[in-house]
Structure formats: structure tokens, C-alpha cells
Amino acid sequence: MKRILLFLAIVTISLGASALQPQRGYRGFIDWDNNLTQYDVWYQGNHKTYFYTGVSTSHGYQFNPNFFLGAGLGVQYNKYSDSYIVPLFIQVRTDQKFGKFTPFGDLRVGFSCTDGGGLYLSPSIGYRFNWGRKVGVNVGVGLTVKGSVVDIFEGKYYDDGIFNITQIGTEYRTKLLFAFRVGFDF
């Protein structure tokens, strides 16, 4: 994993330090998404780190050199817990240019289609590198808030040795994940 990140950093730095501002019209993104979080393992009394990786794409309209609005879909997978994050989202993005410095701010708001559904919110900041006339390489970090619905159970032990588990309801929970994205815009 460290070698891949080092390779991507070297490639993006070698592509040039500044980027042309996006032009008005259609704009699309393809990103490699990574999310990292910790879960409490109640029966072991410790924390377990989960790493989700996958892709996302969004497409929309660049209104001016600074403002983009679009919609997208992502799929991320964690092989250790065999779980997915599948968000449908609206993306709002601002690209800035300060001399040769070209940062961006990005906000994805939508619905997480897994774990019973729920809120998906992912703000990030990053840097856009120029790669050719109309293509940019984006590197960003941020947070992801993912909502889910969980079942609540109650266990009862009876005197005759029988242990009975019954579902007493559901509960809505949110999880905070650290996000890292590398991608292309075109």
C-alpha cells in the first residue's frame, strides 16, 4: 500500500505543479476512494481497524471556472468484514487558483444504499494537478459520515437453562471514516 501511494505521489508531482482552471460545460470524475475507520469489538474488548477501498464516478456541469455541480455513484469494499459502502450522492465542488497553487474543496451529500440505508456525507479538500489540456489529477483527504440501521436484540436467561434472544427494535447509527481520494477529472 505504501509503495502504491509513493508511486502516485511521484507521478502527480512530476505532472506539473499547476493546473488550468476547468472550463464551462460537462465535467466528469473517476476516483479511487479509500476510507479507514475503527469498530469496537464488544466481545473482545478492543478496536478493529477497517479499510474500505473502491471507485466512484460523478458527472455534471461546470458552471464557471470555480463551481461544479453533479451527481455520482460509488462502490467500496472491505474484504475482512465482507461489507460494502455504496453511496448515491450529489457533488458540489469549488476549484480555486492562487498563482500556481490550485486547491479544491468538495462536498458529497447523499444516501448510503448498504446497511439498511442512511446518510452519506463526505467533505474533502485537496489539490488539482494539470495533466494535459483538459484532464486533471486530483488528490484529496477528508471525512466520510455513513449512516446505517442496526437491529437491537435482548437476551434473557431462564432458570431452566434456556437462553432466549429477541429483537426489540432498530436503531439508526452513524460512523465517521477518514477518506483519501486520488482521481482524474475530464
Image: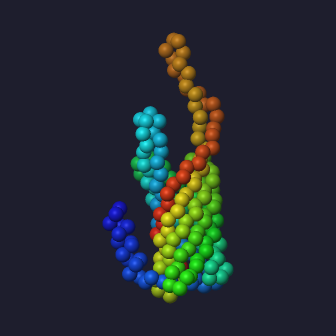
x and y percentages locating residue 69 in the rendered image = 65, 72
Q: Residue at x 57, y 55 (%)?
A: 145
Which quadrant does the N terminus fall into? bottom left
x and y percentages locating residue 41 in the rendered image = 45, 39
Please determine whether, in this image, residue 35 is positioned above or below residue 107: above
- Determine if residue 93 is in view: yes
x and y percentages locating residue 84 in the rendered image = 50, 53
Q: Residue at x 53, y 12 (%)?
A: 159
Residue farthest right in this picture = 63
x and y percentages locating residue 154 in the rendered image = 58, 28
Q: Residue at x 51, y 17 (%)?
A: 162
Residue farthest front in this picture = 99
Q: State the image quarter where residue 46 is shown.
A: top left
Please determine whether, in this image, residue 166 is positioned above or below residue 149: above
The image's colouring method is rainbow
Residue farthest left in this picture = 3
- Tally of marks: 0
Q: Tell me: 49 left or right of 162.
A: left
Q: Tell me: 125 left or right of 171.
A: left
- Determine if residue 62 is in view: no
Q: Residue at x 58, y 31 (%)?
A: 153
Residue farthest bottom in this picture = 133
